[in-house]
Amino acid sequence: MKKLSFFNKLVFILNCIVALVLLIACLNSYLTVNILSSFYIFSLFIPLLFLFNLFFCLYWLFKRKKHFFLSFVVLSIGYFVFGVFYKVNSDKNKSDSKSLTILNYNVWGFNKNEWIKEPNIGDKIIEFIKDEDPDILCLQEHSRIRYTQLLQYPYRSETPYTTPRSIQAIFSKFPIVSSGSLELPNTINNIIYADIVSSSDTIRVYNMHLQSYNIVPSSETLSEKESERTYHKIIETFSKQLTQAKIFKEHLDKSPYKTIISGDFNNTQFSNVYRIVKGDFQDSFLEAGEGFGRTYDLKGLPMRIDYILADNSFEVLEHQNYDVKLSDHYPIKATLKIKD
């Protein structure tokens, strides 16, 4: 520090802060208790923390200063903990006659509240689904009346009528032999599942919709008056998601079947919520996707908060992200094959 100019001393102090935040975010992703809850919010911005640390690393290399080691070490730890968040083109195998396709989509109530100011958005979503024609379809924020437009699926399971909740649905071309709901406490969000007899085996499909933030990013929510309330709402949401992930994991551990997890987690792959749910499952995007894998835009920042996960009984053949702006989320589809 003694040999640094005043400006470079300030740069290094800022470098230390950014590196420390990324390091704490790495640690926080492994915690299953609310010890460092204030740092949950940083998991939403891990890609930016990576970019900032990369900038500092390159800056010190350009200056020929050994200070670059700080960000280099933290970046290495971050890569080991989180993996990649941008995928290059994958050379995975293509589908064959024994594969099955599963499409996941938060359809935002088929735009029944007209958030998107265009006509017939709900019907356009239906047309998109029909064109893609997946074997299994998982919808979040579903509308029960829309099943009559999806008659290509003879089998379906939906969130029960018993409590007022955001509706999830699983549609299938294969018979559903049993189904259920996890009935998450103190929330309108929920997790449902269906046991499906495919051509070669019985598989369990979970459709998850974890706790929503119920925050619309705007100048108002970021104002001084509302920022504290917004902050506490985000922390409360993370806490509920963590509880829901644990409830799900307990249920998953009792499943006797090969399993696929699909849904809107409302959190990124850098969170402990994602880590708990994923466990040792395969993330179809990480296995066979490309690009950022965006499923949601936060003020122009591409975020991946919707997932298709498969246990190791499956081979992930393909993953596709769609640039279809018919909801606040973007759909994803995976092609899977049960291993011989």
Image (tube, grey):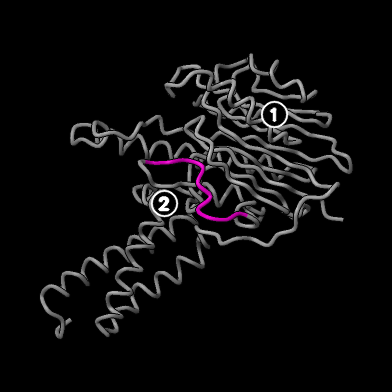
In the rendered image, residue 93, in percent from the top left (x then y), is placed at 75, 58
Amino acid type of the residue tagged 1 in the rendering = Lys
In the rendered image, residue 259, in percent from the top left (x then y), is placed at 74, 44
In the rendered image, residue 211, in percent from the top left (x then y), is placed at 49, 33
**Which residue has dot 1 on it?**
130
Q: Nearer the viewer, residue 230 or 89?
A: 89
Residue at image coords 24%, 34%: 219
Residue at image coords 26%, 64%: 17
Amino acid type of the residue tagged 2 in the rendering = Ser
Residue at image coords 87%, 42%: 201
**Which residue has dot 2 on it?**
43
Classify the position of the C terminus by image quarter: bottom right
Query: Of discs 1 and 2, which sits in the foreground?
Result: 1
Classify the position of the N terminus by image quarter: bottom left
Question: What is the C-alpha distance between the residues marked 1 and 2?
Answer: 35 Å
In the rendered image, residue 149, in percent from the top left (x then y), is placed at 69, 18
Q: Secondary structure at mark 2?
A: helix
Residue at image coords 46%, 17%: 113
Find out whether residue 293 is within the magenta segment.
yes
- What is the span of residues highlighted in magenta in the rendered image? 289-298
Q: Secondary structure at mark 1?
A: helix
- Give left or right: position of 41 versus 130: left
| Mark seen at residue 276 | none
Task: Tell me the quarter of the picture where residue 28 sits.
Answer: bottom left
Query: What secondary structure is the stretch in magenta mostly built from?
Result: loop
Which numbered disc, 1 or 2, marks the residue that appears first in the sequence?
Answer: 2
Above/below status of 186 relative to 57? above
Find out whether residue 61 is within the magenta segment.
no
Above/below status of 49 relative to 32? below
Q: Assess disc 2: are there few (<14), some (14-19) or many (≥20) residues with their C-alpha within 10 Å of its C-alpha.
A: many
Count every numbered label the image shows and give the total.
Answer: 2
- Give left or right: position of 90 versus 113: right
